[in-house]
Amino acid sequence: MKRLLLTSNGLSNLRLIKEAKKLLTKPADETKVLVMYTLRKKSYVKYLRRTKKQLIKLGIKRKNIICINISKKIKKPNLDFDIFYSCGGNTFYILDRIRKTGFDKIIKSFVKKGGFYVGLSAGSIIVHKTIELAGWGRERDLNDINLKNLTGLKITNTMVFPHYRAGLKKEVDEFKKIVNYPVIELRDGRALLILGNKFKRV
């Protein structure tokens, strides 16, 4: 059964940490996490640090958090992990890098086997059948790598719109009119929980 927690800005509050704990299949202090991130800008390091702090609050031991920077060439990762955590950033760049590093196949296989996937912002968008949402609206990601193939990982047919706020309602409503799949708005501090074919906002 699919187990996904698609967040706007990570496990940023106690409610989301509690939801994540419910999805663990072993004690938190025995759980291993693979964190996938990009480092296009040095400033992204602060987001990685924040992610680690959130995982430690979940009860994960620091030694059980393995971070892999897909901005560079990588060796085949150790696939002995219980949670796959995909950080945010530029969605077009992330999709391009997971294809080039083979992480697209790793994620799909992991989720298919019932692994627990946590997405943060762009990490929540890439699991959809397309990342076209990333290029929509005034706060869209810049497709500065000129990525042509916007096909996502096709793990879910429900799209999330992260970092939503009332001022973006008009453009989100316009986007909903031109697509044929559900779009769930997520404010920071919220997430979409997907279990099998069922989903709910948390």
Image (spheres, rainbow, N blue to C red):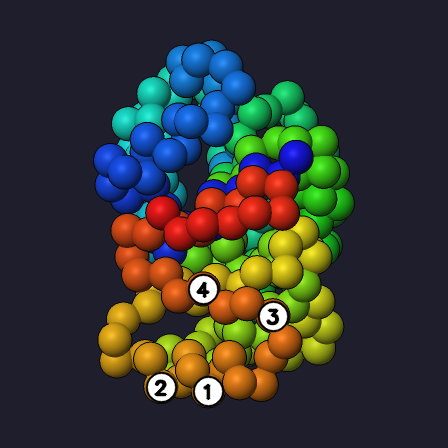
Characterize the local packing of mark 3: few (<14), some (14-19) or many (20 or more) Cα atoms within 10 angstroms. Answer: few
Say if 145 sits above or below 52 in the image.
Answer: below
Where does the N terminus fall, quadrant-wise?
Answer: top right
Label 3 residue SS:
loop
Q: State if disc 4 and disc 1 touch (CB < 8 Å).
A: no
The x and y percentages for residue 119 are 48, 48
Q: Do the residues under discs 2 and 1 have CB atoms within 8 angstroms? A: yes
Identify which amino acid the numbered label 4 is placed on: Ile
Nearer-N-terminus badge (1/4): 1
Could you tell whether 195 is left or right of 29 in the image?
Answer: right
Q: Is residue 191 above or below residue 179?
A: above
Q: Dot 4, how many residues are within 10 Å of its Cα: few (below 14), some (14-19), or many (20+)?
A: some
Q: What is the number of callouts on the image?
A: 4
Which label belongs to residue 170? 2
Secondary structure under badge 2?
Answer: helix
Provide the residue designation for mark 4.
184
Q: Residues within 10 Å of mark 1 (few under 14, many from 20)?
A: few
Cα–Cα gap, marks 3 and 1: 13 Å
- Name which residue type carries label 2: Lys
Do the numbered discs 3 and 1 sit on residues whose CB atoms are within 8 Å?
A: no
Mark earlier in primary sequence (3, 2): 2
Mark 4 secondary-structure assignment? strand
Query: In whole angstroms, how far apart are the C-alphas of marks 3 and 2?
Result: 18 Å
- Which amino acid is tagged 3? Tyr
Identity, as a three-letter code, of the amino acid under mark 1: Glu
Residue 111 image position (x, y, % from top left): 66, 38
Q: Which residue is mark 3?
A: 181
Q: What x and y, as percent, mark residue 134?
A: 51, 72
Q: Which residue is mark 1?
A: 174
Q: Closer to the N terminus: mark 3 or mark 1?
A: 1
Residue 31: where, in percent of width, then height? 48, 19
Q: CA distance from mark 4 to mark 3?
A: 10 Å
